[in-house]
Image (cartoon, grey):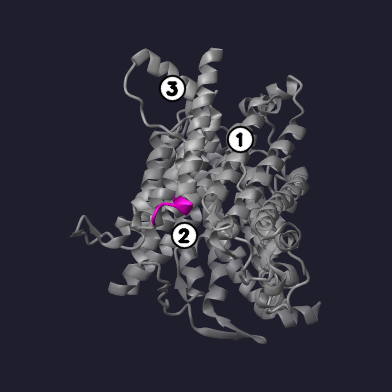
Amino acid sequence: MGKTLYTPSEKRAGRVIAVVLLAALYVLLFLLDNVLPQNSFTLMLIPVLKKGAIYSLICVSMNLLNGFTGLFSLGQAGFMLIGAYAYAIFSIPKAQHEAVYQYFHGGVIRFSIPEALQSVLGADLGAFLGAVICIIIAGLFAAGFAALIGIPVLRLKSDYLAIATLGFAEIIRAVFQWDGLGVVTNGSNLLRKYTSFSDIRVGSLRFTTVFPFLIATLCILLIVLLINSSYGRAFKAIRDDEIAAEAMGVNLFKHKMLSFVISSFFAGVGGALLAMYQTTIQAAAFKTAMTYEILLIVVIGGIGSISGSCIASFLFIACNEWWLRFLDSGSFLGVSVPFFRDGFRKVVFSVIIMVVVLFFSRGIMGDRELSFAGLIRRLKRKNTAAPAAADETGGDAS
Amino acid sequence: MAGFFQANLPYILAGISVGGQYALIAIGYTMVYGILRLINFAHGDVFMVAGLVMVYATASLPMYISIPLVIAATVLLGFVIERVAYKPLRSAPRMSVMISAIGVSYLLQNCALYFTGGLAQIYPTIPGLSKSVTIGSATTKVVTLVTPILTIILVFALVLFIRKTKIGMAMRAVSKDFETSQLMGIRINAVISMTFVIGCFLAAIGSLLYFTNYPSVIPTSGAMPGLKAFVAAVFGGIGSIPGAVIGAFIIGIMENIIKGLGSGWTIFSDAFTFVLLIVVLLVKPTGIFGEKTTDKV
């Protein structure tokens, strides 16, 4: 628990390193988008980076609730669904409405925010601003819904809270698939043709990978600022001992609500980014299993560690989509292995997760953060070669 | 009223049948929660595995060997899960055990996905259960009639077991106070294992009845019935066996009546269960038969 204290110069140096690494990362991403040639390596790398950034945000938002406030909520998939739908609905171009809502006479929402802005600000800036505004709307819808259900749900404790939020997520999924709302949600059909990552560009320069990183970094930075503020300290007090926190004058309901609403806002943003990444979205995909997966990533990273969640997200996505693919392919280094077939990767994965849960319950980072100031101190002491530990959230440097 | 009954008879019959099946799963949840204060998220997946074992067993073995084999395998699975995934965490915070349960659920689903290759496995017809019978205006399968009767017999036997036997007494003691009963010389691990064995035994029987009504088993088949059975357990008052059974029957019947309202409403038959859950949690969190507990500082 004990937090290491750093001298101002160490802090400053840590912050400088974080900013430099972050800048280097963005340059690299920009090069990946525009300059570097497409080959089998980058074709695997780019989706992993995009999805990893999105999952980082979603996992950090869940960690804010489960790890920092001690509210065991299992409603993340529901809030992501709201975010994804809100984003998609407001950004489908007017001309595409007939095609997308083909069973609902073109739907009732007959405008598109990116399109409206494009007509005023030009194609590039309009698409970018429109996407950002839609993402914020997505977050607000998710947060609004969280505020609504928070009033009754947050009275519940631990496992009852978990099962109630899970129940709400399932209800949302059913409502969004209901034909009665089809004019807005397109029923159980796909939503598509909305603004996606590939629409974010300046002239011929593409920002398909930069954009999700930009939004995710910004959001995670905001969460870090929140956690380090007095609100964050109140959240941690509630997590450690609710009754003691109340006795010390922390307004339980207010702070729980705040954490719940903010976490849902960012889950909604994450859902919107996921919608952009996938280019099509369907309510049926946001199952409880999705929440479980996110929870397990948070556990692997360490409950109560922002940088842990980010590292675990990138590791999970990279293993899932890239590094462990060979487990499904039937052969390893040219040798055919009979039990390597479809789904084996997932089995290996679940076994790893169970091992982490049972024997390394603190996960990768425990409740510590990756900090460059700490790294500097260790380097000074050892004076050895620099370990390569560049993390995308570099902003946590304390 | 009579008209409503007449019109909805097929749905009510299906509801009673599925309600009995949920009841058999719900008992597993409620007993485990009563003793360990753990929502065993993996229970629904154990139920699904029982279905898959049946598919694979009947492929090469006759029915009279397959059925006991399914029950034995499910019981063994439940026992192993408890020993491997929950026992090491006995002194850990409740959240860790719940995460472990979610991990087990993820593992079972992924293993099922691997072994089935992602294909739906056709469930075998159990002779005698799949025959059609006509009651009044409705035609249904024999399993619809067998389920409620079998459920009630099993629940009755279970209640007797808990009331009359020594291990039943130990179970009641453990669910009242975990630590004190340990001090009184109750072998807590044996009691907890017994709870899982009983829960999984009933889930195996439930799966035999449940999947007879459905053409096939897929890796996620257990998730929804599992959650609904859990809601039934909460509705009835978690920790109470009669409560779980009554809750399960109510949920089974209501969800089928909703299915009968028309095609637009089918999507809400699952959501209804959760609406009920939330209403119960808000109005009477202890459920119909639950005991009120107070938190100690």
Residue carrying label 2: B47
Cα distance in 3D space between marks 1 and 3: 20 Å
Q: Which of the two discs, 1 and 3, labels the residue nearer the N terminus?
A: 1
| Dot 3 crowding, Cα within 10 Å, few <14, some 14–19, many 20+ | some
The residue that disc 1 covers is A221
The CA span between labels 1 and 2 is: 43 Å
Closest to the observer, A311 or A299: A311
Magenta residues, as a range?
A32-37
Expressed as whole percent of the image width and height from the top left, the position of residue A253 reads 76, 34
Q: Residue at x 73, y 57 (%)?
A: A121
Q: Which of the two discs, 3 and 2, sits closer to the camera? A: 3
Residue A287 visible here: no
Task: Identify residue for label 3.
Answer: A375
Q: Which chain carries label 2?
A: B
- Label 1 CA crowd tier, 10 Å (few <14, some 14–19, many 20+): some
Q: Is residue A154 above or below residue B179?
A: below
- The residue at the point 33 percent across, 57 percent down is A344
Q: As displayed, is residue B290 above or below residue A4?
A: below
Mark 2 is surrounded, within 10 Å at the Cα level, by few (under 14), some (14 to 19) or many (20 or more) other residues, namely many
Q: In which quarter of the image is residue A225?
A: top right
